[in-house]
Image: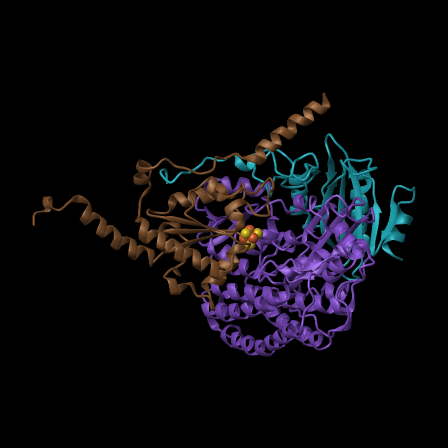
Chain colours: A cyan, B brown, C purple
Amino acid sequence: MSAEDALKSKFDGGELAFSQFRDNHRIVVPAAKLFEVLAFLKNEQNFDMLAEVTAVDYLEYEGAKDRFGVVYVIVCTKSGERLVIKTFVNDPEPLLPSVYSLWKSADWLEREVYDMFGIRFSGHPDLRRILTPDEFTAYPLRKDYPLKGRGERHNFPVLTRAES
Amino acid sequence: MAMKDVPDNIFMTSLDAAASWARSNSLWPMPFATACCGIELMATASSRFDLARFGAEVMRFSPRQCDLMIVAGRVVMKMLPVLQRIWLQMPEPKWCISMGACACTGGVFDTYAVVQGVDRFIPVDLYVPGCPPRPEQLMAGIIALQDKIKHGGTLNGTEFGKRTQPTGPTPYDLDELIRIREANEKLISIN
Amino acid sequence: MPFEVSDLAELDAPDKEYLWTLNFGPQHPATHTTLRLILTLDGETVVNAVPHIGYLHSGFEKLGEHLDFNQYVTIVDRMNYISPLHNEISWHHAVEKLLGIELTPRCKYLRTILAELMRIQDHLLNTGTCALDLGGFTAFLYFFQQRELIYDIVETASGQRFHTSYTRVGGVAFDVNNAWVNKVRSFVKGFAAVHAEVHRLLTRNRIFIERVKGIGYLSAEDCINMGVTGPLARASGVLRDLRKDEPYLAYPDLDFKVVAAKDGDCYARYLVRMQEMVESIKIIEQCIENIPEGPVNVDAGSKAVIPAKPSVYRSIEGLIQHFEVMMPNRGFPTPKEEIYAATESPNGELGYYIVSDGTPRAYRARTRPPSYIHFAVFPQIIKNHQLSDVVAVLGSLNIIAAELDR
Ligand code: SF4
């Protein structure tokens, strides 16, 4: 039985949406069920590697209902199967359960999502900014942040030859 | 001949020239290599191109021992304070080469994080353009710098400050202005 | 690896006063580029290591949202800059998967050869600098000489020796000729001797072995749980290689082996990398003799492809097509979909997650950088090692800062 069938039989009720595009098998999961589904896939379906956690800001996307989509790509290293799990969260307090307890690779991946999009993960052991400086206040990959920033890059003291 | 008979500048100048000549032929670079250009810098220093032919192969990673800083690669917000600190740690006289499009102007990375040219925040003597510059180009740059040192003499910061007013781009520029204008336009359209 | 709260309390206790803190980087020769570690040391033993990254964060992914699929190739180049062409191949692999373009056989073979050359290039620099950091300068020089030959090959094909921007949607910028094929042949012929020489220099060198053997052990379970892929995982006995597991380009037709080791230490990683170069040479040998004839770009009937220059200059259809692809306000329709596609880069699984909103510009272009995930492992494997082992472990992890921070 494939992982998708197993999921269908375990979580029947129509909350999960299954689809396929090229070779990507995708499942859309409501945020409340996310941890349960991922834990089921990890513990009972042997998806032992979390390859990727990322987010998308759907602010300007045509026909999108929710603000953020968070994507998990998981892999079963035995069979080589790959699943793309997706869930949606919204402003003002985007919050998801952390999957650090299932896969350790979630540590930095979730920190990056927090840094870039401001989505918080409850239960993450160390949710700090990772790529941008600590004093940075914006979330740069949100669509309402301009490509060239808000002048942060010019905000430094100038050293002249006479001073150095 | 008594010392006071010699015009002051003659003696001084010739020693300076000798020192400049010696300095120009034994530059000790401090490779501030942050990104791809650093790999080309490595290529310049290793087999085939061999920077040692120009007396500048003694790469020292401690700023205290160097007199030529080669900024190779883009410098971003988080890195800039480090760059300035390392520049201050280098003993005088010192020179700076900005290697690659990113270090000179920000290059292809006109984004929120990348400093648009290190010359906004530290003094730069020589720009080597290219993405990345070929090793030959960097060598040409180093030879040009040697020339500059030979002819220009060596100054330290205090002397320099007495002689000229510091020049260079101011830390905000056109794209800032465009951004401000765009923001204003948006406001108007909302109203 | 984050501090446990209990750890912190322990460090603060007065009887732990003998512990001291060392700042390592961000400007340090052994970090090659820009990494920073805060090490807590007990004498010379590393008790804890906290990596700080982001010293080269330059907004690649934000730029990807503003450039179209062909333009962004110039940016992905700069990501893993010791094997630039492989990033391009991965990026366009993802884009072509999104658009549903099937490459021509000639292009597949060409890209395979280039990808393998890049793998060799990456491993050359990595093993070379790893040896350099541990005191062996000669191997570095020998290997850099070989890298220069690969630069020459790449330059012949694309016109640039470093950031080539060579691939395009549905093909490559220029076709290659016989001179190029001969260059690759002669490189392949000469490589074995240098490789053997470095084997003689390092593999049984007492000093080298003492520094790397048993250092930085990573178990297979940890590898999988922490998402480690590529040569690092294979050195720990995880038999996973996307070239075999999810074949792409010409890999299904080729005969090659996946190299793996059991030990999981720095020495095993070194050996895996050395052996992978041999396998790559084998792949190139097979490909270079069988490059299929025919066009290198897919048929220009497909809307997304830049037409060949002669057709742009001599026919109105070509000109229109060129115009459509190149002008920023025109473009071609793309499926309004999202896709994750990955290839086996020299460093591990290099994936792209593309969200397309129907325009030829990605709505979101996310990279799954192997270095980022591998560096997260570092605090765990350095624990209870000596300070001098930090360099050996960093060298064997092959962290590329631009890919790490993007
Ligand atoms: S100028 Fe080009 S090669 Fe140099 S750091 Fe910038 S992107 Fe890299």
Label count reads 0
Q: What is the x, y in percent for residue C391?
A: 50, 58
Vertical side of C261 occupied by A57: above or below: above
Q: What is the x, y in percent for residue A83?
A: 80, 53
Give the camera-side residue of C215 and B187. Answer: B187
Residue drawn at 38 percent across, 49 percent down: B95
Give the camera-side residue of C96 and B180. Answer: B180
Report the side of C36 relative to C302 (left or right). left
Say which quarter of the image contains residue B163. top left
Q: Please identify the residue farthest to the top as the structure is shown.
A: B191
Report the side of C176 relative to B134 (left or right). right
* Residue A89 visible in the picture: yes
Residue drawn at 46 percent across, 39 percent down: B121
Q: What is the x, y in percent for residue C33?
A: 52, 53
Residue drawn at 67 percent across, 58 percent down: C88
Residue drawn at 62 percent across, 71 percent down: C277
Q: Please identify the residue farthest to the left as the structure is shown.
A: B1
Q: Quadrant of the C terminus of chain B?
A: top right
* Residue A75 visible in the picture: no
Q: What is the x, y in percent for residue B168?
A: 44, 38
Report the side of C376 relative to A77 (left or right). left
